[in-house]
Image (spheres, rainbow, N blue to C red):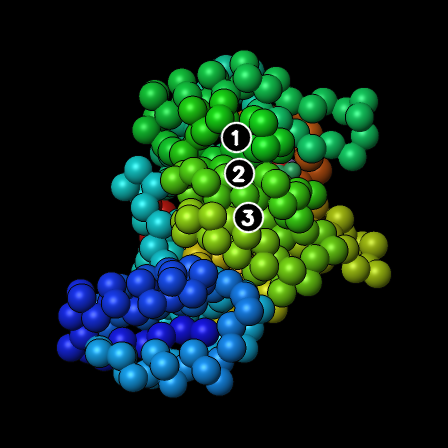
Amino acid sequence: MIVVMRADASAEDVAGVVARLERQGLSAHVSEGEERTIIGVLGSPIDHAELGPALEAMGGVDRTVRVSKPYKLASRQFQPVNTIIDVRGVKIGGPEVVMIAGPCSVESQEQVLRIAEAVAAVGARLFRAGAYKPRTSPYAFRGHGEAALDMLVKVREQTGLPIVTEVMAPGDVGVVGQATDVFQIGARNMQNYPLLEEVGRTEIPVLLKRGPSATIEEWLLAAEYIMAQGNKQVMLCERGIRTFETATRNTFDINAVAFAKKETHLPVIGDPSHGTGVRSLVGPVGLGAIAAGADGLIVECHHDPDKSWSDAAQALGLDTFRELMAQSQAVSRAIGRTMAGAPVA
Ligand code: PEP
Ligand code: MN
């Protein structure tokens, strides 16, 4: 249920409703909009027939609305205005489209610095690279772990780019959180509920990838797990799903981008690298994601793409990446937005 306060409701009115809910063992999530405050009511059981009229009789309450969706805090019903996440001054979810770029894995200090400097020079606003890699085969390169986190900290120091890196285990949230500016939750971990709750107890923004076989509802409920712990800075990342199609590694679900923008207030990021798995398709599909409303892209690139230690087949070379920045700017402008930092073609 949500409680919509009147535009002239006082802080005492809001506090009164919160106290009334808490007395009943329910939790209240207050969202202060520009025009009015909305209070999300979570917990169970909620007896709508009884609680609704009781709350509506209280001072400052305009109305109560039953939230029909299973996800509440993530829902646009609960918060009509877009969430804008500020990562060291980079705003994600606002009018500007943002590019997150970097290699799949941290390979060496020189490699991450070289790629970070190149992508920063053409307007990428955040740097991505994996220190802990979820690999299908246990014999594949699984990341340099903590040593790679130190290399990422150096990248931020030298380029100013905030860092996005994956955390795979609840026990690593502390150490990864010391280094990163955004936690990436990988597709395979989308339903690792202890991990979701652990990052939910931090104040570090989270990029939540959609599981390869997750429905959109399951994905939004995964976001809800994080938000219910207090961390509301969640961005949703569509990275392709498993379908009957075998021509590409995954099938990028453009519907999910448009749907998530409509149903939630959270920023949505498109990942055309994992979404296609094919270098030549990354650009076209990424541009499609921007056209569908994505607030940003996360793209894998490398100075020597064929020699990438992981995901080589989808890595863009730096020249191709530069072209994608210019094209992303053109598509952003076509829909009344701009891409932060990208050259005008
Ligand atoms: C990655 O970003 O390199 C990655 C492993 O992504 P996903 O979890 O989407 O497969
Ligand atoms: Mn990858």
Examine the image and state in which quarter residue 55 appears: bottom left
Indicate yes or no: mark 2 CB to ligand 1 under 8 Å. no
Residue 331 — which label?
none
The residue pinned by badge 1 equals: 173
Instruction: Tell me the crowding category of disc 3: few under 14, some 14 to 19, or many 20 or more residues within 10 angstroms, Cα based.
Output: many
278, 157: nearer the viewer: 157
Instruction: Tell me the crowding category of disc 1: few under 14, some 14 to 19, or many 20 or more residues within 10 angstroms, Cα based.
Output: some
Disc 2 on helix, strand or loop?
helix
Left or right? Give the position of 24 relative to 133. Answer: left
**Residue 137 in sight from this viewpoint:** yes
The amino acid on which the numbered mark 2 sits, given as a three-letter code, is Glu
Disc 3 on helix, strand or loop?
strand
The residue pinned by badge 3 equals: 208
* Among the two numbered marks 2 and 1 on one chain, the one whose residue lies closer to the N terminus: 1
Task: Tell whether label 2 touches label 3 (CB within 8 Å).
Answer: no
The residue pinned by badge 2 equals: 198
Task: Tell whether label 1 touches label 2 (CB within 8 Å).
Answer: yes
Please tell me whether residue 86 is drawn above or below residue 119 in the rendered image. Answer: below
**Residue 246: x and y, percent?**
83, 54
**Residue 108: x and y, percent?**
55, 16
